[in-house]
Structure formats: C-alpha cells, structure tokens
Image (cartoon, rainbow, N blue to C red):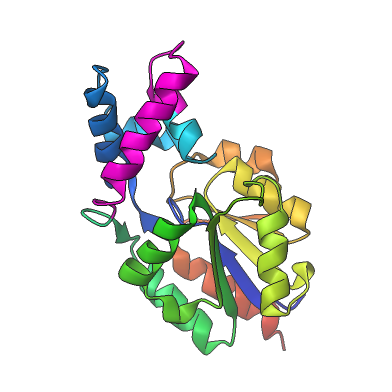
C-alpha cells in the first residue's frame, strides 16, 4: 500500500480548540440564562456540527426555537474569539512539515462551518501545507457521511484507497471507512480509544510523528 495523501479532521486532531469552543458556548448559554459547563465536558459535545454542539450543551428539552437563538449567539461570539486559546497539538507542525517533505498531499475536512475552518487553518497551522480545506458547506452532508472526504481526494487527484484519514472520533473513523480510506485514530484528541475502535479504526497513534513513520514504512519498503 502506497499513501499519496493524508486528510485530517481539525478540532481534536490538528488543533486543541476546546477552550475557545467552551468559552463561546458558555457565553451563549449565559445570555439565555443557562448554566455553563467545564471545558472538558465539551469533548463529548463536539463532533457532529455546531448545532448538535449547542443542543448537547443546552438543558434537555430546550425548544428548537431557543436552540436556534443560542446557536446564532454562539456563532457571533465564536467568530470573534476562535483563536484566543486555540493552538496546534504538540508535534503537529513537525508532522505536517515532514509529510510535505515526503511528497504527501494534504487536506482538512471538518464539520466546523467552512469560514472559521479556513481561517483557523490559515492562522493556526498555515494554509500552505494543504491542497484542500473543507468545513461544513451547504449541500454537502457532514461526517460520518464520506462525501467531503471523497471530494477532497478527487480534488487532490488521488484514489480514496491512496489516502489515510486521521481523526479523533468514531464518526471520523466511520467516514474514512465509508470513503474507502485508511482509518487512523488520534489518541491525543477529544474522544477515547474505545470509540475510535468501535468506529472502525485500522491504526491508532499516540503521537503525531507516529503517523509520519507509519506512512514512511508503507511507502518506502525495501
């Protein structure tokens, strides 16, 4: 097996955005008289799009109309504060630089809305590494649907079987498997090993540089 491309989830995989997500969601909840959650609780709230994040953070039984209002407040707050505390995980910049030197094409596919996805990649990681950056876009279903992953592979000119997808949730693993890509789990992210394995992960990495070595071993076997 030769890998020609690597596709990445964003939050919980390339960047640790948990505190900015939590701060913004808690501020939006407070505007509606609801209590806040510790940042660690948001590890379970994220992963299926921003509306689902707000539904999970809001009290059970909150009316859909109020969810809409909280979501609007969240978007306004987050769009002004999404790089306050967000940083790459340790050794992510080194991983990206090493993969680039190996000639690996790279893309980001996130369920985060597209505009902040693109801006965060630019400001936190630098867009020069990536041939494709996709956030949530109208008409394109969110992961675990494989549509965005398949589109990213097509734009990069590679077959899905030539791509490895790295994510930190069970939904990421399901999307990779459905897309026909190699499913790799990031154990430093928001979710646990058991969820990644249940989603169909084929390999789990404890450190980003393990992914570089994994690709090197597959691509440069003697």
Asked if residue 176 lies in the magenta stretch, the reply is no
Decide: is 165 above or below 31.
below
Which residue is drawn at the image coordinates 44% and 33% (left, top)? 53
**Extreme residue toward the top, this view:** 61
Q: Position of residue 94 (x, y in %)?
A: 39, 76
Decide: is 84 above or below 219.
above
Which residue is drawn at the image coordinates 41% and 37% (left, top)? 43
Q: Which residues are magenta?
A: 55-82
Quick check: 16 left or right of 165?
A: left
Quick check: 14 left or right of 73?
A: right
Task: Please say whether residue 60 is visible from this viewpoint.
Answer: yes
Q: Quadrant of residue 183?
A: bottom right
Which residue is drawn at the image coordinates 66% and 58% (left, top)? 148
Q: Nearer the viewer, residue 4 or 204?
A: 4
Most common secondary structure along the magenta stretch: helix
Q: Nearer the viewer, residue 50 or 130?
A: 50
Task: Please say whether residue 201 is visible from this viewpoint.
Answer: no
Q: Nearer the viewer, residue 62 or 157?
A: 62
Total marks in image: 0
Q: Position of residue 51 (x, y in %)?
A: 48, 34
**Placement of the C terminus among the 4 image quadrants:** bottom right
Which residue is drawn at the image coordinates 31% and 51% (left, top)? 79
Q: Nearer the viewer, residue 122 or 43?
A: 122
Asked if residue 65 lies in the magenta stretch, the reply is yes
Q: Position of residue 1 (x, y in %)?
A: 77, 75
Q: Position of residue 122 (x, y in %)?
A: 37, 71
Decide: is 213 above or below 101.
above
């Amino acid at each position: 097996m030769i890998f020609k491309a690597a596709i990445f989830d964003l939050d919980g995989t390339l960047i640790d955005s948990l505190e900015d997500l939590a701060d913004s969601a808690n501020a939006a909840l407070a505007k509606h008289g609801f209590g806040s959650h510790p940042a660690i609780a948001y590890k379970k709230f994220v992963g299926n799009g921003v509306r689902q994040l707000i539904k999970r953070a809001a009290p059970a039984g909150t009316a859909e109309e109020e969810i809409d209002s909280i979501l609007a407040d969240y978007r306004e707050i987050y769009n002004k504060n999404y790089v306050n505390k967000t940083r790459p995980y340790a050794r992510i910049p080194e991983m990206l630089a090493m993969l680039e030197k190996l000639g690996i094409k790279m893309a980001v596919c996130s369920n985060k809305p597209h505009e902040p996805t693109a801006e965060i990649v630019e400001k936190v990681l630098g867009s020069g590494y990536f041939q494709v950056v996709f956030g949530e876009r109208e008409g394109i279903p969110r992961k675990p649907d494989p549509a965005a992953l398949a589109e990213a592979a097509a734009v990069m000119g590679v077959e899905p079987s030539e791509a490895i997808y790295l994510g930190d949730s069970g939904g990421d693993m399901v999307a990779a498997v459905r897309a026909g890509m190699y499913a790799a789990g990031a154990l430093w992210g928001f979710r646990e090993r058991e969820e990644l394995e249940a989603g169909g992960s084929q390999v789990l990495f404890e450190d980003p540089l393990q992914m570089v070595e994994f690709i090197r071993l597959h691509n440069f076997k003697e």
